[in-house]
Image (cartoon, helix red, strand yellow):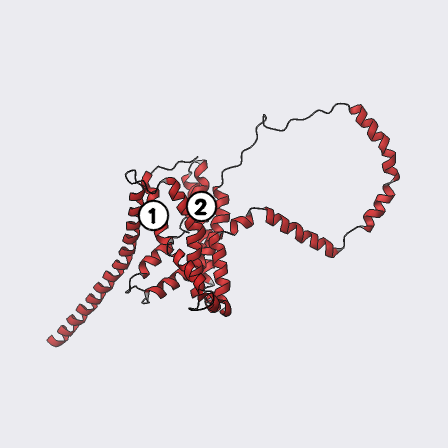
Amino acid sequence: MNSNVYTELVTVARVYQQFEESATTLLQFAVVPVLKILILCAFGLGLASSYVNILPAQCRKLLSKLVFALFLPCLIFTQLGKAVTLQSIIEWWFIPINVVLGASFGCALGYLVALIVRPPPQYFNFTVVMIGIGNIGNIPLVIIASICRDESNPFGLDPTVCNTNGVAYISFGQWVGAVIVYTFAFHMLAPPKTVPTNDEKALVIKVEGDKDVNELSNGTASNVNDTDSLHVSLLRSCQPTKLQKVRQGVARKWRWLAKSSLLKDICQPPVVSSLLALIIGATPTLKELFFEEHSVFFFFTDSLNMLGGAMVPCIMLVLGGNLIGGTGYSAYS
């Protein structure tokens, strides 16, 4: 009897010890990566302070543009292209769909919240967008980079493999989020179009000499009537065929797409780098040329990898520097 009780107590103690160790490990991986991010932001805050003033507002703006146009595309291209394959693209089909569904349901919820809360008119679209797609950004890339630096990471992988797979997994869905942000979000947050007032409307120009114009038109009416048959015959002979109409329609649509800002909004550097990484990663021959060590273009990919490594610290410095004004620093204009 006593031996059975002792065995049960030992079993409970072991279970409690394992639970305590797992809880401690879970707490460690939940807190430590965030602490690393806060330390990076603290450096940015200190550099942007008035005492140091190494990272002023203009410098932060330029650094943010550099991250968006160079560092982030390099990181996405090198990590996503290295980890992705045609099989993984098929297996990860649910990621872009989840991003689209999450943004759709989030915007619907944001619209409902805006109707209930009734913010000022200038903040209505802002409320919808921030609730719907406010979490689409680069923070997941920062968190996964912070978690995977530890050799005892919860994924049980080598830090390099963990970082590569994690960045690839996030980037595969991030390009869909980028398309949503640079199309829908930019359209929602665009300033309202100004309606011209009565003073700004176009002036009606009064044409004088109506009599001369009428005489001129009456004089030429007979010539026009005489040449009607000739114009009709020429038009009938020059009517385009169905194939020509299709070509003209396609050319017209292509010119409209080239002139519109939609293509420019979608073709942002992170989106382009993601698509290139997917194409190269899904093609075994191209992947060997760019991502295999000692290959022909590996030096180029390795250079991009070094540039991509600057994305996380730079974006955290910018984020920390933007906190220098405190709450209420930004104002609607």
**Residue 193 horizontal/vertical position (percent):** 53, 36
Residue visible at 60% across and 49% down? Answer: 258
Q: How far apart, in angstroms, are the residues tagged by discs 1 and 2?
A: 25 Å
Q: Nearer the viewer, residue 121 or 142?
A: 142
Residue 47 appears in view? yes
- N-terminal-most mark, 1 or 2: 2
Residue drawn at 36 percent across, 46 percent down: 318
Residues 69 and 327: in front is: 69
As helix, strand or loop, the secondary structure at mark 1 comes to helix
Mark 1: few/some/many CA within 10 Å (<14, 14-19, 20+): many
Displayed quadrant of residue 170: bottom left
Of badges 1 and 2, nearer the viewer stands: 1
In the rendered view of the protein, which quadrant contains the C terminus? top left
Which of the 4 quarters of the picture holds residue 232? top right
Q: Position of residue 23 (x, y in %)?
A: 24, 61
Mark 2 closeness class: few <14, some 14–19, many ≥20 residues within 10 Å: many
Q: What's under tag 2, amino acid-wise?
A: Val
Q: Which residue shows up at 31% across the image and 61% down it?
A: 149
Which residue is denoted by mark 1 in the rendering?
Answer: 317
Q: Is residue 192 left or right of residue 235?
A: left
Task: Please indicate, yes or no, whether residue 1 appears anywhere in the rendered image.
Answer: no
For disc 2, the marked residue is: 129
Q: Is the residue 85 above or below the residue 271 in the image?
A: below
